């Protein structure tokens, strides 16, 4: 596995995880599925990407998480509102040749993201 800078944010229906090394954002849904998106947010763009949605209560994700959450209604509908603000940390990752990933968070929790779109935690 490789140690990388990551960020996470908790939502009503799951979690978003960002990896610096590949600039990918993973949406992990409580339903047992996951999806990934390229982080297209760049420094200098607005931190809040959802015009017309309040920014404070409940908290709305910002930067790359916010851009994915705002631009993809399926992500927004499955995750719901943010429960926490984004937090950075160092985590460990291992990528499968077939497209899946193992991600270990700073809490020690490990998520196995299968290429089938399902995940389990260990």
Image (spheres, rainbow, N blue to C red):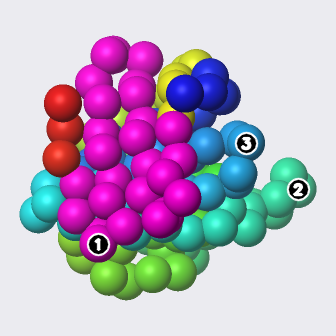
> Is-magenta flag for residue 117?
yes
Q: Secondary structure at mark 3?
A: loop
Look at 73% across and 67% down and name the residue there.
40
Q: Secondary structure at mark 1?
A: loop
114 over 76 or under it: above or below: above
Measure the alpha-carbon separation of dots 1 and 2: 35 Å
Q: Is residue 41 left or right of residue 16?
A: right
Distance (Cα) linking label 3 and label 2: 20 Å
User: Residue 32 occupies which quadrant of the picture?
Assistant: bottom left
Rounded to the nearest angstrom, the CA distance separating label 3 from label 1 is 23 Å
Please identify the quadrant where the C terminus is shown: top left
Please tell me whether residue 2 is drawn above or below residue 16 in the rendered image: above
Residue ranking furthest to the front: 97
Q: Who is closer to the viewer here, 35 or 40? A: 35
Q: What is the residue that sits farthest to the right in this orientation?
A: 44
Give left or right: position of 45 versus 79: right
Mark 2, residue position? 44
Residue 47 image offset from top left, x and y in percent: 68, 55
Position of 36 compared to 63: left or right? left
The residue indicated by pointer 3 is 21
Query: What stretch of residues is rendered in magenta?
Result: 94-119
Considering only order in the chain, which callout, 2 or 1, is on the residue closer to the N terminus? 2
Determine whether 6 is above or below 15 in the image: above
**Foreground tag (3 vs 2):** 3
Q: Nearer the viewer, residue 43 or 23?
A: 23
Residue 116's quadrant in the figure? bottom left
**Residue at mark 1:** 116
Q: Residues within 10 Å of mark 2 (few under 14, many from 20)?
A: few
């Amino acid at each position: 596995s490789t140690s990388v800078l990551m960020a996470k944010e908790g939502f009503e229906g799951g979690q978003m995880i960002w990896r610096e090394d590949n600039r990918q954002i993973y949406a992990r849904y409580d339903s047992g599925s996951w999806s990934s998106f390229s982080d297209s947010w760049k420094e200098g763009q607005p931190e809040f990407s959802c015009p017309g949605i309040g920014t404070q209560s409940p908290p709305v994700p910002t930067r790359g998480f916010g851009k994915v959450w705002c631009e993809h209604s399926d992500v927004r509908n499955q995750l719901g509102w943010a429960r926490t603000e984004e937090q950075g940390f160092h985590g460990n990752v291992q990528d499968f040749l077939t497209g899946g990933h193992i991600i270990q968070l700073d809490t020690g929790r490990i998520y196995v993201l299968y290429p089938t779109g399902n995940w389990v935690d260990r």
